[in-house]
Image (cartoon, rainbow, N blue to C red):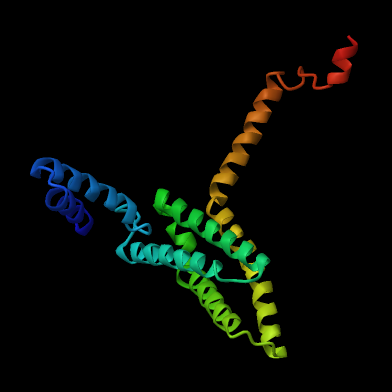
Amino acid sequence: MLLGGTFFAVPYLALGIGAIPAAAIGVAAYGAGNLLFKDRTKIDLSDDISENDKESLKKAKDMITKLRDISTRLESTELVKNTKAICNTSDKIIDTVIEKPEKIKKIRNFLSYYLPVTKKILERYDEIENQKLTTAETKKFMSSVEEMISKIKLAFEEQLSNIYQTEMIDTDAELKVFESMLKSDGFIDNIDFDIDKKKEV
């Protein structure tokens, strides 16, 4: 609203533009401001998801945003890479559940424990890194966190894969049935994939 009002007042009062054109400029600026400054963590959630789960998903989106912010301050290239990968995978997990609300039960531990603890670990790492300490204990701590984050990255990717486990099993069964039908109808056995042999004919 402030942005739109400003863009109305400046043309109208300072530039002497008529009230109607100035109002049009203000409305346009207000709309542009909404697009520019809208809450990037806002998500549309299905009514099939409980209120508690909706709140958990919103908090997860906020945590992912904070993790991305932390990644911009880290010095270790590998840690930055793994943190960004964790954020990207986490986004995919959340987006998948938003599209498939029935999958929410598969990620409750992810929402309530895995993601919050990951955020806490990286916050502590960032805090200690900023102190520029060089003690043996500090180096050991930072090394253990870097190793742990690489494991968390793989674990989150596995979590995303597990969401699609049922679909993969069903599709695998369909592929086997389809292959059997192709064989029984003689289509597969009649296909010659030997390119060099075909060139000789």
Looking at the rendered image, the quarter that the C terminus falls into is top right
The percent coordinates of residue 106 (x first, y second) are: 49, 60
Relative height, residue 179 to residue 165 (above, below): above
Residue lying furthest left: 19
**Residue 118 visible from this viewpoint:** yes
Number of numbered callouts drawn: 0
Residue drawn 66% across the image and 70% down it: 76
Looking at the rendered image, the quarter that the N terminus falls into is bottom left
The percent coordinates of residue 197 (x first, y second) are: 88, 17
Residue drawn 80% across the image and 22% down it: 193
Q: Nearer the viewer, residue 124 or 44?
A: 124
Q: Please give left or right for residue 115 compared with residue 26 in the image.
A: right
Q: Please give left or right for residue 97 compared with residue 52 in the image.
A: right
Relative height, residue 44 to residue 69 (above, below): above
Residue drawn 63% across the image and 70% down it: 149
* Rendering quarter of residue 172: top right
Residue lying furthest top: 201
Residue drawn 58% across the image and 79% down it: 125
The percent coordinates of residue 187 (x first, y second) are: 70, 19
Relative height, residue 82 to residue 28 (above, below): below
Residue lying furthest right: 200
The percent coordinates of residue 5 (x first, y second) are: 17, 55
Relative height, residue 126 to residue 3 (above, below): below
**Residue 44 visible from this viewpoint:** no
* Rendering quarter of residue 39: bottom left
* Rendering quarter of residue 181: top right
